[in-house]
Amino acid sequence: MAPGNTVTTNSEAMETMTQQAPMVPAGSQRAELEVKMSRFIAHAERVTTREAAMAVVERLRGEFPDARHHCWAYFIGNPAGAASAAMSDDGEPSGTAGKPILNVIQHKGLADVVVVVVRYFGGVKLGAGGLVRAYAGATERVLAALPVERHVPRSTVVLQVDFAREQAVRHWVDTHDAVIEAVDYGDGVTIRLTVAESLIDDLESFCAANAMTLEYG
């Protein structure tokens, strides 16, 4: 190795990959904020599709049918890559509800999350600035309490190998972010495992070099 060069080990690479994985909700959370007699009830949970996010919004509408506003925003995908987002002011002045909710989500760096803020009007108008602060504050409060975890996208694959190469597969699994789910013995060995999607190219190269068959599913 030339002076000054750095070698990255498999464990270091896996740790880096995990650190780069987005944070996602590990559960759901509620929080309340009261501003000049208006109640802001914020709800956050994990979603992975727009349809799931809209289902959460409708569920909150059903739970609080007499509330004046059900404002929301969601962010789906990796903040550092491909993602989709949407928001709604639900009758509040444009830009005073959905956008502040989404801004807080993005500031937190969260992925696959929807936040719905239900407002019960208290009789006192808050003005545009007051609404922005209230919706952002309610979102900040619920996300501060929301349990989160890192999400590493994974795929399930099936390897067909001969008996002599089973240990090589087990060694590859032990040194990479992969887990063996099942092993069946017949004319050869069928190994079903889950692996981080970022390692699929490495696994394909490993299989090609060792005359192993790889199938997805």
Image: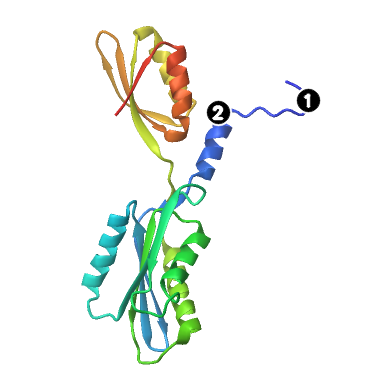
Secondary structure of the residue carrying numbered label 2: helix
Position of residue 21 measured from the top left corner of the image (x, y, whole percent)? 49, 44
- Residue at 46% x, 26% y is 201
Pick the front one: 18 or 124: 124
Q: Is residue 166 visible?
A: yes
Q: Which mark is residue 3?
A: 1
Left or right of 54 in this view: 176: right
Give above or below for 30 relative to 193: below
- Residue 147 seen: no
Relative vertical location of residue 87 with respect to residue 158 in this rendering, above or below: below
Residue in the image at 55% along x and 31% along y: 11
Q: Amino acid at mark 1?
A: Pro
Residue 113 appears left or right of 188: right
Residue in front for this viewpoint, 76 or 195: 76
Sooner in the amino-acid sequence: mark 2 or mark 1: 1
Choose between 36 and 214: the one closer to the eye: 214
